[in-house]
Image: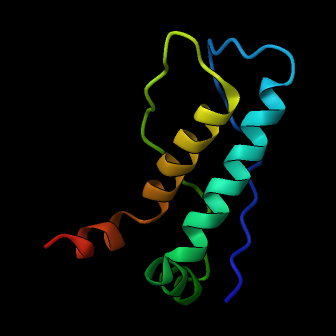
Amino acid sequence: MRIELHIEELVLEGVPLAGAQAEHLQAALIEALSQRLGEDGALAARLAASGGQAVVRAASIHLPARPDGRTLGRQIAASLHDGLAPSTRANDAP
């Protein structure tokens, strides 16, 4: 099953990313989100059955004192995945 995700805009207010950190954030976000989506069969099935999801409301993330792009990318990926999969996450609870 193929999942296609388009992020039109990612707003990070007040996040001081210098130099290549923005590129590191993008690469880490793509890698981590691809991995999470690829492993979540229940989410893939739900998205396929519903025809997709136009908007994702992601939770806030913890911003460390010295943010780096890779860490932020992984945190954003987790938040986006959880925003896409709230109902499947609830079904995973014991």
- Report which quarter residue 93 is drawn in: bottom left
Q: Nearer the viewer, residue 19 or 14?
A: 19
- In the image, residue 21 sits, relative to residue 39, either above or below, namely above
The answer to whether any part of residue 57 appears in the image is: no
- In the image, residue 86 sits, relative to residue 72, either above or below, namely below
Q: Nearer the viewer, residue 67 or 11?
A: 67
Left/right of residue 69 with respect to residue 83 in the rendered view: right
Residue 16: % across, % down = 69, 11
Count of numbered badges drawn on the protein: 0
- In the image, residue 34 sits, relative to residue 10, either above or below, namely below
- Report which quarter residue 17 is drawn in: top right
Going 70% across and 56% down the picture, which residue do you hit? Answer: 31
Residue 49: % across, % down = 53, 89
The answer to whether any part of residue 12 appears in the image is: yes
Going 32% across and 67% down the picture, which residue do you hit? Answer: 89
Residue 24: % across, % down = 78, 35
Q: Nearer the viewer, residue 49 or 38?
A: 38
- Report which quarter residue 25 is drawn in: top right
Q: Quadrant of the N terminus?
A: bottom right
Question: What's the coloring here?
Answer: rainbow
Q: Quadrant of the C terminus?
A: bottom left
Residue 2: % across, % down = 71, 83
- In the image, residue 79 sits, relative to residue 53, either above or below, namely above
Going 35% across and 63% down the picture, which residue do you hit? Answer: 86
Going 60% across and 75% down the picture, which residue do you hit? Answer: 38
